[in-house]
Amino acid sequence: RSKRPAGAPDRKLARPVTKIGVVGAGLMASQLALLFARQLKVPVVLTDIDQERVDKGVAYVHAEVDKLLGKKRISSDAANRTKALVSGSVSKESFADADFVIEAVFEELNVKKQVFAEVEAIVSPECVLATNTSSLSVTAMAEDLQYPERLVGFHFFNPVAVMPLLEIVRAPKTDDTVLATAFELAKGLKKTAVLVKDAAAFVVNRILLRLMGEVIAAFDEGTPAEVADSALRPMGLPMSPFTLSAMVGLPVAQHVQESLHAAFGERFAVSQNLQKLVDNGVKSLWAPGPEGKPV
Ligand code: CAA
């Protein structure tokens, strides 16, 4: 008998999940849609603000399934089934019969609150709502909900397909049924779920940002990129900090830094340089300015 993860309620409380809605069709959202369809084998609807974004999200899922097929990691039946389970829409109306809806939109509290207000007007009162936020307060996100007890944090790591950890965030009002459903889903997704408190950047990003923040600070202070970034490689990191920040996305890294700064002040300084790079649409710290110099 497998041991119940620390803090997880009795699994008998979990509700069945037979259809999932994903709000957003960007990098995280489309990886989530693929994971849900592949591991849980339930229909997944991806939504976004326009058809182009929706199509891009669905196309990502198809391309990743084709890669798995090419590597013989899945059968052609499973590949076809997974593709067929993921659909896209610009309307959230198709969430009406979903049991679980997760958002992975822009890291802005008001945007997420607006999304949940729209979703709550469509879904049933029993539908579990989840946020994939990296650093925002789940409690604040729940405050205007009609049923705040149904919101839970469900925080994945990039790349979703291979990173084993999932932070499940309990807000003060999250109820045991919702939490038990989240843990059962995590099990079905074959992720290692840990229960964390609703605190700025939860646990993993808080630790990760100490490292990333120092590397970015060294870079800001004029340490050349190749030194600031590569100095840590012999420490056995699977990916250098700059490569990791490019994969996660500089705007996400910057939002996490801001949330941590708001919560802990100078312990987590905000890099003005990083802000400028994000404003200029720079994607990687390896090539930030005209001569590879910080702008
Ligand atoms: N999508 C899907 N699969 C991917 C992938 C991606 N983006 N990147 C790599 N993979 C898969 C590969 O296809 C490969 O699978 P197979 O074995 O089936 O072929 C497997 O991962 C290993 O990849 P590689 O052999 O190419 O490379 P690797 O051994 O260096 O591993 C890695 C790649 C797992 C990404 C590794 O570099 C790593 O662990 N990097 C650190 C990632 C990390 O720290 N993520 C957390 C970011 S923080 C975050 O996401 C939170 C937040 O809120 C901001």
Image (cartoon, grey):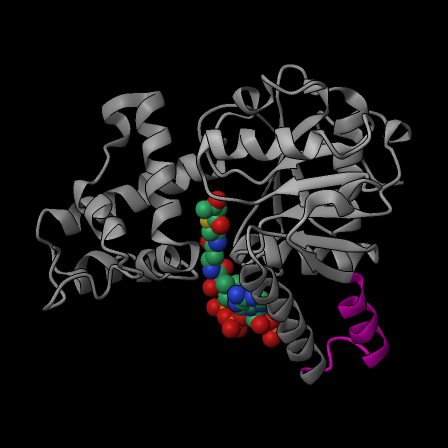
- The quadrant of the image that shows the C terminus is bottom left
* 109 in relation to 245, above or below: above
Where on the picture, by quarter, is residue 241? bottom left
Percent coordinates x, y for residue 216 in the rendering: 23, 48
38 versus 259 height, above or below: below
Q: Which residues are magenta?
A: 71-85
Task: Answer left or right for 251 relative to 189.
Answer: left
Q: Is residue 15 magenta?
A: no
Can residue 267 be spotted in the picture? Answer: yes
The mark tally for this picture is 0
The picture places residue 9, in percent across and down from the top left corner, at 79, 25
Viewer-proximal residue among 81 and 213: 81
Q: Residue at x 69, y 49 (%)?
A: 191
- Quadrant of the drawing holding the N terminus: top right
Question: Which residue occupies the extreme bottom position in the image?
Answer: 70
Residue 100 point in image, percent of width and height: 76, 39
Q: Main secondary structure of the magenta part?
A: helix
Tell me: 264 left or right of 121.
left
Residue at the (86%, 32%) spot, across then down:
14
Rendered residue at 85%/26% (across/down): 10
Q: Left or right of 272: which side holds 253?
A: right
Q: Position of residue 200 (x, y in %)?
A: 44, 27
Residue 38 seen in the current view? no
Is residue 77 magenta-colored? yes
